[in-house]
Amino acid sequence: MIVLGISGGIRSGHHDAAAVLYRDGNLVAAAEEERFTRIKHSEGRLPESAVRFCLSQARIDIRDVDALAYGYATVPGMDRRLKDYFNLRFGHCPEVHLIRHYLAHAASAYRVSGFADAMILSADVSGDSISTLLSHGKGSEIRIVKSIPRPNSLGIFYSMLTQILGFQRDNDEYKVMGLASYGRNEVDLSWLLQYGGGEYRLNYEEYMVPVGPAQPFPSKQEGIYSQRLVERLGRPRLKDEPLTQRHMDLAHSVQKTLERAVTDLVTWLHGETGSRNLCIAGGVGLNCVMNQRLLALPFVDQVYVQPAASDAGTAIGASLEVLAERGVQPEVMEHVYTGPAFANEEIQTALDSYKVPYRKEEDVCRFAAEKLAEGAIVAWFQGAMEFGPRALGNRSILGDPRDPAMKDRINATIKFREDFRPFAPAVLEERVEEYFYDGVKSPFMTLTFDVRKEKQREIASITHVDGTARIQTVGHKTNPRFHRLISEFARITGIPMVINTSFNVKGQPIVCTPREAVSTFFMTGMDYLVLGDYVLSKR
């Protein structure tokens, strides 16, 4: 059974276009369209390039695909339009299966979590007229417990305030999350969002632009909030204006309000299901601080967050629903190294064509670790590209977590982004508890943890102002080369982790090809670029 799953679409509100391919229960390939088009989020597009990659990776033709799965079910005429599109672009269209958007989100997390029983929280702005789905997974069944319709939406709540703070909605919410740690005073937002008893209520009638049941939301270049919200909160910040304590306090308040509202939902869902495991998907699920609060709840034993929790992940979930209908159980998702990869021969051919000086290293892991220990910033390009928004050690920029100035250096000279933005540590899985309270396996950077107080000065550049860090645990089984690099760094320095941030600059997708890696390397302040076994140096 071969299933091709896609996300994205034809409307301006459709984003995060992606394609995945399952052969029976095995994920053969998965990639986001933005990595090929170089247009972040690939809004309003279907994933033509990503589909071609998946077919190529599986060494099959479109006619070999048994089913095409798509995570929207209520877009008028979408089945016909998909057939027309695939016939036009590929010469054939497999049988189309339209899966409800929030069911696709839920399936994308639960069906690959390895849990036999779990609460499932799916929340984002909206999809198929739903904004939040609370469900219960047991065995092969996903039972819907409660759904909340748009525009009564936690995603809209966070997006409205993201815009007020001068950031781009549906893109910069993670900036609000990072800025929230600098807040000192909480602003009461109960007039905007109320919650309790497994319900929440967004006062969209007063504080959001009017949107009818069948109308699309305003485009992302337009405001989604009403003038009444401006009257309550003051003039919106322009994106280039300084951030003041007022902005930090508002970000803090937005984050805390979201955390409490979602905690109430999960508490209610636990009462309805009795489950002690929790699966999370949807764009709201990328809020790793919120996820830490949920993991800390006394009735939650384990949390699994879909690593591509955004709409890209619905390509996975839609595929899994089609497979579930046929009794196929998928493999547990332990890694997301499912995108394009380049062998040494391909990298060498590319470097020769670029006419840049390079050399081959006998042991790139040791080389990179030594340079990191000397204070260099190293770009690391290895193996298959990651699926989802996080770089997890194959398309990464690496630094020394001991250097207190490293965060500012990377932000200013490489990422070209705001100075308050924190960086994540990639830490050896077997040593996570030495540095983080309640540290558990977290391979996808979807949870924050408190840094042990006695370790905070030692790893100053990855410790956020609130004493937390969004960690990635690295296991030898899932990424042996990255694990060895960190092990070599630990041998030299005693510190079993490195700074790990995505290999891109502000506003651009993560690099995919050697050409993009070389281009980004030379346009930034990085010191070394390691591609496969080859090294480029500015020193």
Image (tube, helix red, strand yellow):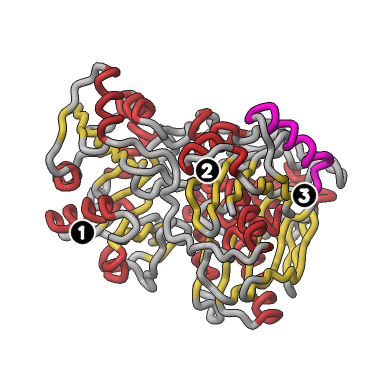
Image point 36% across, 41% down: which residue?
A: 395
How many other residues sit within 10 Å of disc 3, few (<14), some (14-19) or many (≥20)?
some
Which of 267/73 is in front? 73
Among the two numbered marks 2 and 3 on one chain, the one whose residue lies closer to the N terminus: 3
Secondary structure mostly seen in the magenta stretch: helix
Residue 133 position in % (x across, y down): 71, 62
Task: Check the image and name the residue furthest to the front.
Answer: 64
- Tell me the element at label 3: loop
Question: For the magenta stretch, what is the residue range?
Answer: 73-90
Q: Amino acid at mark 2?
A: Thr
Is 74 contained in the magenta span?
yes
Residue 533's quadrant in the figure? top left
Residue 502 position in % (x across, y down): 39, 42
| Front: mark 1 or 2 | 1
How many other residues sit within 10 Å of disc 2, few (<14), some (14-19) or many (≥20)?
few
Image point 66% across, 53% down: which residue?
A: 124
Image point 60% across, 38% down: which residue?
A: 62
Is 178 contained in the magenta span?
no
- Tell me the element at label 2: loop
- Identify residue for label 3: 73
Among the two numbered marks 3 and 1 on one chain, the one whose residue lies closer to the N terminus: 3
Residue 433's quadrant in the figure? bottom left
Which of 512/58 is in front? 58
Residue 291 position in % (x across, y down): 53, 64
Against 534, residue 213 (above or below) is below
Residue 462: image tag: none
Residue 244: image tag: 2
Against 257, residue 33 (above or below) is above
Apparent side of residue 411 relative to residue 131 in the rendered image (left or right): left
- Identify residue for label 1: 495
